Amino acid sequence: MAKRSDEEMRSEMVAAAEGEAKMEIFKEGTVESHPYAFHVSGPRNVSSPNWRDLINSSWKDSNYKRTVMACFVQAVYLLEIDRQENRTAENALAPKWLIPFKYKLIETLNDERDGSIFGAILEWDRSAALADFVLIRPSGAPRAVLALRGTLLKSQTMRRDIEDDLRFLTWESLKGSVRFNAALKALKSIANKYGSNNVCVVGHSLGAGFALQVGKALAKEGIHIEAHLFNPPSVSLAMSLRNIGEKAGFAWKRFKSSMLPTNTDTETSCNENMPSFQIGLKQWVPHLYINNSDYICCSYTDQDNGLQDRRADKENAKPTNGHFAGAKLFLSSNKGKQKFLEAHGLEQWWSDNLELQMAISNSKLITQQLKSLYTLPASQLTQAKRQ
């Protein structure tokens, strides 16, 4: 074989070096241009905390808080994606959604059935804040956040996610899930550590369902945690059956009131003499973010038209410390019908052109879900009537 000239060898070495350089550029470009990278799909006009927040905190702006909370949930989705794609600390996607807001990951919540990450505890990063001359935590910024993701249709976690989706669809409850117990334990832990006024819980889709139910569980114990729920699930077989039962019950009451004599006067007198009960709990009011084009969560916008009737219904009335269950509902006011994936997506809640309108607070569904917080058990009602 003929020997290659020095010039040929130099040319081959240069070509190989150029190829390696192009490969490195390609790899870096792939990471940097990932569709889930913060600078690619994250919010555009949200500033990081700085010394000005000591004077006028950005966290007092509800739009800013909503945006940051949505980013925290996105970070949990990406924690699981990073895990599945074996990303390292150098090229992980999730931390980039926390760093701009001066928060850090403290602990992940893993599903014991498949090892997947479904939640995370985030904490105010004091060291990062001090590096940018933010000497104290801005007013309104929580010390810790429990963030819970929704369904992720990827092979390693899809089965368990859908299992919990079906659990809610069937029973309108997630208490039987191992994730419920883990989330409740985590939320109670950070509430005890930092104080309930310094903690938030946030979730999207299935994660919002878990956030609502663990928040309600703590509210029953008198621990009220600020909750932000994006596209929470609202459709279930149990709800459909309950609605049918309510309609049948309403028809029977109408028939009974028109055909049979009533003892309204006696009941009214009994209720007037009933002692006033003070539950001692302030009302827990979660924040719900709803898109009417999303059939998973749109049932929350159905008004509770029978609320006034139930207040006047002495047969079912219960002392409630003057409160009826309610929530702050925020409706996406995008014009026109949206496709489901867009309407149910998390990205809409940090969009620059998002327009929100405050919706009705007497949602029929939220009233049904939260009324047990402000309703006395039947045994106490019986005792009250005897007195």
Image (cartoon, rainbow, N blue to C red):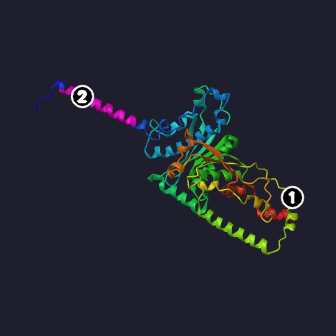
Residue at 36% across / 32% down in the picture? 25
Secondary structure under the numbered disc 1 in the rendered image: loop
Using residue 74 as the reference point, say whether residue 55 is left or right of it: right
Q: Quadrant of residue 233?
A: bottom right
For residue 131, the mark is: none
Residue that sits furthest to the front in the current view: 336
Amino acid type, residue under disc 1 in the picture: Pro
Instruction: Please state which amino acid type lies under the numbered disc 2.
Output: Met
Label 1 CA crowd tier, 10 Å (few <14, some 14–19, many 20+): few
x then y, percent, for residue 20: 31, 32
Q: Nearer the viewer, residue 378 or 302?
A: 302
Between disc 1 and disc 2, the foreground one is 1
Residue 346 shows in the view: yes
> Which mark is on residue 13?
2
Left or right of residue 288: residue 263:
right
Q: Quadrant of residue 91?
A: top left
Which of the two labelled residues, at mark 1 and mark 2, occupies the earlier sequence position?
A: 2
**How far across and how far down the image is residue 33, in percent?**
42, 37
| Residue 110 visible in the current orientation | no
Q: Residue furthest bottom?
A: 259
Judge by depth and name the residue closer to the eye, 187 or 274: 274
The residue where tag 1 is placed is: 275
Magenta residue span: 8-29
Q: Is residue 20 magenta?
A: yes
Vertical comparison of 77 with 170: above or below: above
Crowd tier of the residue under label 2, counting other residues whose Cα lies within 10 Å: few below 14, some 14–19, many 20 or above = few
Marks 1/2: CA distance? 93 Å
Badge 2 marks a residue whose secondary structure is helix
Quadrant for the C terminus in the image: bottom right
Residue 60, image x, y percentages = 67, 36
Residue 166, horizontal then vertical, whole percent: 54, 60
